[in-house]
Amino acid sequence: MNRRTFRSFWSFGLACVLGLCSPLLQAQTASEGPDQLIKRLSTEVLDTVKADKDVQAGDVRKIVVFVDGKVMPYVNFTRMTASAVGRNWRQATPEQQKRLQEEFKTMLVRTYSGALSQVKDQTVSVKPLRAAPTDNEVIVRTEVVGRGEPIQLDYRMEKGPAGWRIYDLNVLGVWLVETYRTQFAQEISANGIDGLIVALAERNKSGSASSRRN
């Protein structure tokens, strides 16, 4: 699989995680299991991508509007960011933690938005959930089926007062949080928490300028 195709499926998973779903996104019901939630979100994301030419074209500004217009009810983004930052998260001040979440979210949207143009005719098959009814953390395993071999796309999820939420995703054995944890640790080791915030902000500004030029 080439890098562009890999990124397209990771972007599809991120679309679910970051709330890039239909404006008619339904509220999660108390009886909705984690596998049912992923199936519904995946279907809504695919329908949105197929129906919106701007999203297919990777329009960053429109995607950002979609994401910012939601409260991300199906993701524990604080946990996702904290896990990516690693042990240094506890050393960060509340303001630094807030900035890290903002810049990390912006970076994810900008990094993977363009790859959504590769997501067109796929469907999602959710594998049988291997978990006990009392489990509060599960992995929902899915396959994205289209042309060529099915693509593994899995979600780590936790159950809280508001229901099930996503905090990590995996494409072909590569977990998103682990990937960024290594990069972030190197930046923090060299320049501290503030250095990581600055690096993310500069990357996001560069991506914004590039998107305007395009």
Image (tube, rainbow, N blue to C red):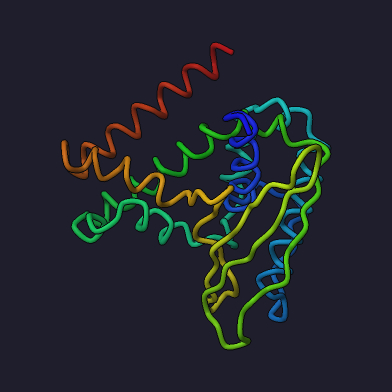
From this view, report whether residue 178 is shown above or below residue 7. Answer: below
Give the residue at x 46% y 44%: 105
Q: Residue furthest bottom?
A: 134
Give the residue at x 63% y 66%: 140
Q: Number of labelled discs?
A: 0
Give the side of residue 80 with respect to residue 187, left or right. Answer: right
Q: Residue furthest top?
A: 213
Give the residue at x 72% y 75%: 32
Q: Nearer the viewer, residue 201 or 71?
A: 201
Where residue 103 sits, quadrant-wise, is top left
Q: What percent of the width, then of the height, locates residue 148?
A: 78, 38
From this view, report whether residue 38 is shown above or below residue 107. Answer: below
Q: What percent of the width, then of the height, locates residue 195?
A: 21, 36
Give the side of residue 151 with respect to residue 7, left or right. Answer: right
Position of the C terminus by quadrant: top right
Q: Nearer the viewer, residue 107 or 162?
A: 107
Give the side of residue 22 with respect to residue 212, left or right. Answer: right
Give the side of residue 61 with respect to residue 105, left or right. Answer: right
From this view, report whether residue 78 is shown above or below residue 50. Answer: below
Q: What percent of the width, then of the height, locates residue 119?
A: 73, 36
Position of the N terminus by quadrant: top right
Give the residue at x 56% y 72%: 138
Q: What percent of the width, then of the height, locates residue 51?
A: 83, 37
